[in-house]
Image (cartoon, helix red, strand yellow):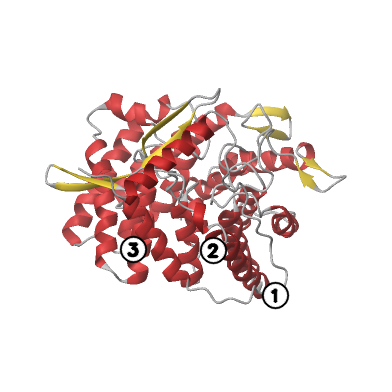
Amino acid sequence: MKLNAIDLERQVALIYLSYIGCKMETDLPDKTETQFSDGDDCGVNYDYLKEARNIGEKIIERGFSVVVNNKKENSWICYTGFGDDYYSVNPVGWDLYKGNCGMAVFFMYLGKTLKKESYIQYAKDTLNSVDRMININNVKDIEAMGFGVFTGIYSYVYTLYKFIQYGLYNEAEIKEVWERIYKIFEFTNENIGKQDRIDVLSGISGIMGVLTTIYKTLDIKYQEVVKEVLSKIVDKLKKEVIYISSEEISWTDNGDIGYAHGNAGIMCHLAGCYEILSDPDILEMIYKSLNYERNTRFNKNDNMWMIREKAHYYSWCNGIAGLLLSKIMLYQSNAKDEKLIGEIKLLIEQLKKYGFGNDFSICHGDIGSISILRYAAEFMNDTQLMKQCTYTLNKFIQNYLVEQAQSLYTLEDWGIMAGKAGIGLGLLDEFNHNNFIAELLSFK
């Protein structure tokens, strides 16, 4: 069997990944060079849907497919770093962050936008391996996978929910899918007390966010199950509180106020939980956590937040993009207070200044910054900021997709949060005048 052009591209990608894994320098561009556009457009009208489709086709091209139990399954290669110059190249796995659940969400959105059944079927096929792997009768397997939303079995729950929301299933399929989700709810109720991680990315606060979103769509029987799970999560968060003073708390001993791993993500999803449980302790925890952020983790001399060490100031995961998203969610909840709107305005200005030019991704790059600023523009009813987001996306396309086209697909990085599928989601959001990415990051 002869090698084709795709095989050769993949060989080059593996060579580059080995360099990166060993912290060797490469000749690949390491920045997007994008800057936020305060005024003028770049003067080029881009076809966002065509660009998104091109990314989708390249992802399909670089993937591989097999048939298992008469069902087609899709996967891709990815790089995983473990520190100390140790890395591994493996299939992407099945999670939302970089794996099959996230890829399925991208192709679902692409297929619904284009009204093309082939992409919708590709999305379903991409989820087949996850259907097969998540066997809740095997407790050890589930425990190995974890329970989180971006990196655990709730990746699957949230993806199934989005498939239902976007009308990918017929009536019989919907019934079967809900049964799968219900079994995971029951399994969670039995095992949530064993979970040690409390963050949004891979812990119980992310689960809390998904459950509060899905709650209103459930039968009364399963609303009660979800309330039990939420109560257990809240009890766990009460126990995990670290008192800085009588009026200040944190959930992290490293002062992390960010969204993915720190206080901001926990607070905003607690606010959603309060609407279901009406536990006054929830609001008290939120206010005391805000006190800690405002009194201890905000430098009043330079008007900047003090995020965790060795993190990108602008990022969704650890920085101000995630803070902005969290504060918008808090303002829209029963935890709203008078200081939030001023903080939201300051975060918008800072994200415009610091949020561009480095990485391309949703997690810690240009697409994440554009998406959260667009969400903020809608929240603030700021039409000028909305236009500026479009102008900035056009500059990103010019600087990254066009001028760096030769190296664009050199690496095997396809997932939605830190890979090329995330760019596709950003382009689809612009085409649809939608906030799909911001809603995904907040589990709506």
**Amino acid type of the residue tagged 1 in the rendering:** Asp
Vertical relation: 217 (above or below) 129: below
Gap between marks 3 and 2 measured at Cα: 31 Å
Name the mark on residue 166. 3
* Lateral position of residue 188 relative to residue 434, left or right: left
Vertical relation: 39 (above or below) 438: below
Classed neighbour count for the residue bearing mark 1: other residues with Cα under 10 Å, few (<14), some (14–19), many (≥20): few
Name the mark on residue 40. 1
Is there CB contact under 8 Å for labels 2 and 1? no
Measuring 41% from the left and 46% from the top, which residue is drawn there?
A: 211
Q: Considering the numbered disc 1 on the image, is that residue within a helix, a strand or a loop?
A: loop
Which residue position holds label 2?
A: 402
Measuring 67% from the left and 28% from the top, which residue is drawn there?
A: 254
Q: Earlier in the sequence, mark 3 or mark 2?
A: 3
Q: Percent x, y for residue 219?
A: 29, 52
The one nearer the camera, 332 or 117, is 117
